[in-house]
Image (spheres, rainbow, N blue to C red):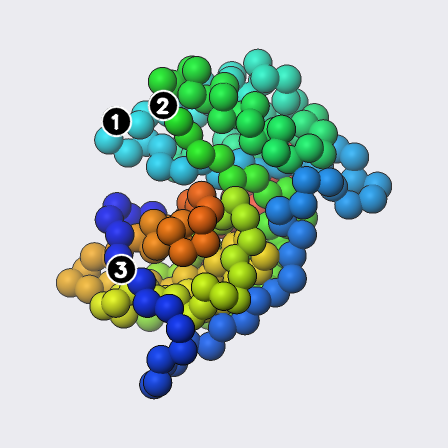
Amino acid sequence: MAPGSGRARRGNEEGTRTHMRTVPSDATDVTAPAGQTDPTYIAFLRAVNVPGRKVEMARLREVLTQLGFTGARTYIASGNAFFTGAGNDRARIVERVEAGLAETFGFEVPTILRTTDELRTELAASPFVGRQPAPDERFSMVYSSGPLTDGGFPLRSAKGDWEVLGACGATAYVRWRLVNGRPVNPVPAIEKTFGVQATGRFFHTSEKILAAAGKG
């Protein structure tokens, strides 16, 4: 996501074109579905490889392996990792990963987890499926650490350069509008509104992340 933040507006405002929908999701459950004993996890790392927060992907894979996870792999430098062998206690997995990253790199790295099945569900529920963004638009997924309830919607920037179109459990669907060729990052506003940690990826990047995770 691009740096920066934007003030957000909530509530039903006359004339808004935002149509909200919230799709049920078990994305924040700490227990895997029955029969799924060893899921493949996708770890989305927040704000890495920006100034002062360098995380080399090779070293990240080493850290995950040292933590006892199996099949550790990464996809592009924005901080996306895949692994198995973690069990089903999601809170404990996040705690282990964040502690290992902080010890290795010297700064906190908030980590958001999804299983491949959860990400597949979130992508399928997206309002962006089958759509092409206009030249001044960008479609993104914002992955959060907790559920995004209807009480926080509608949510959009005061300038109208981004708006949340809906949510699936703990993942928001955000449309950006470029202003003077530059986007504004909605993540800080989403974190503040819902009291969560979050990180964003473009919709097309999320599709590629899921495809890469399935190749292990």
> Camera-side residue: 85 or 75?
85
Q: Using the image, determine if residue 183 lies above or below residue 92.
A: below
- Locate residue 8 relative to residue 109 in the image: left or right: left
Residue 6 screen position, x and y as percent: 26, 57
Residue displayed at 83% across by 44% down: 34
Quadrant of the rendered image containing residue 38: top right
206 w.r.t. 78: above or below: below
**Disc 1/disc 3 C-alpha distance (Å):** 25 Å
Q: Which residue is mark 2?
A: 107
- Residue 111 lies, in percent from the top left, at 49, 35
**Along the line of sight, which residue is nearer the eye, 182 or 192?**
192
**Label of residue 85 in the image:** none
Q: Look at the image and tell me whether residue 62 can be seen.
A: yes
In the rendered structure, the answer to whether residue 215 lies left or right of residue 128 reads right
Q: Is residue 181 left or right of residue 188?
A: left
Q: Quadrant of the C terminus?
A: top right
**Which one is earlier in the sequence, the residue at label 2 or at label 3?**
3
**Which quarter of the picture shows residue 158?**
bottom left
Is residue 207 visible to the viewer in this orientation of the structure? Answer: no
Number of the label disc, if any, that sits on residue 52:
1
Q: Residues within 10 Å of mark 3 (few under 14, many from 20)?
A: some
Callout 2: few (<14), some (14-19), or many (20+) C-alpha neighbours within 10 Å? some
> Is disc 1 in contact with disc 3, using a CB cutoff of under 8 Å?
no
The mark closer to the camera, 2 or 3, is 3
Q: Which mark is residue 7?
A: 3
